[in-house]
Image (cartoon, rainbow, N blue to C red):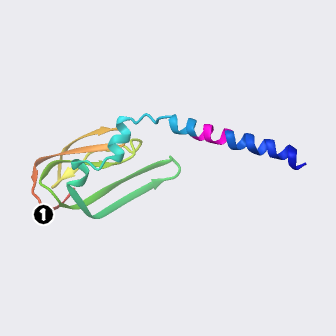
Amino acid sequence: MKLSFYPLFIVLLINLPSKVQAQLLVEKQFTHADTLRGTLSPLRSCYDINFYYLDVKFNIDQRYISGSNEFRFTAVETFDNLQFDLFENLHIDKILFHGKPINFIREGNAVFVKFPDSIKKGNKDAF
């Protein structure tokens, strides 16, 4: 019985490295969305979040969520654009800065905000 098990064990040992090598040879194709989500770019690292205020309303009957979010931040560097992440199935009606709508664009789950003036390093602000 040991003899019949022994050849099977050797075959498994011989085949195991080739299967591991095959898995290592499969390359993941990174997308632009992977880069936006995974890279700590200047647009994501120019500010430090100090506080989030999240106001969410649930409408269970209509399967609908609505709400708003306030970000309070400190500028780590001077900037006029920043990026934050929000799943693309969550619609943005508008982004307000000092009570006025400001421009933004979406690329998948990434949102890019364009401020009317530069936010100076060290300033504390909110939107």
Q: Give neighbour class at mark 1: few <14, some 14-19, many 20+ (Cα, 10 Å).
A: some
Q: Nearer the viewer, residue 51 or 75?
A: 75
Viewed as shown, does residue 37 lie left or right of 100? right
Label 1 sits on what residue type? Gly
Q: Quadrant of residue 51?
A: bottom left
In the image, is residue 11 part of the stretch drawn in magenta? no
Viewed as shown, does residue 67 lie left or right of 64? left
Residue 93 location in percent, x, y? 30, 44
* Residue at point 36%, 43% (across, down): 109
* Residue at point 21%, 57% (across, down): 47
Specify the segment rendered in magenta.
Answer: 15-20
Which residue in the rendered view is the most extreme toward the bottom? 50
Residue 13 location in percent, x, y? 69, 44
Which residue in the rendered view is the most extreme toward the front? 3
Residue 88 location in percent, x, y? 38, 41
* Residue at point 80%, 42% (across, down): 7
Viewed as shown, does residue 27 lie left or right of 88? right
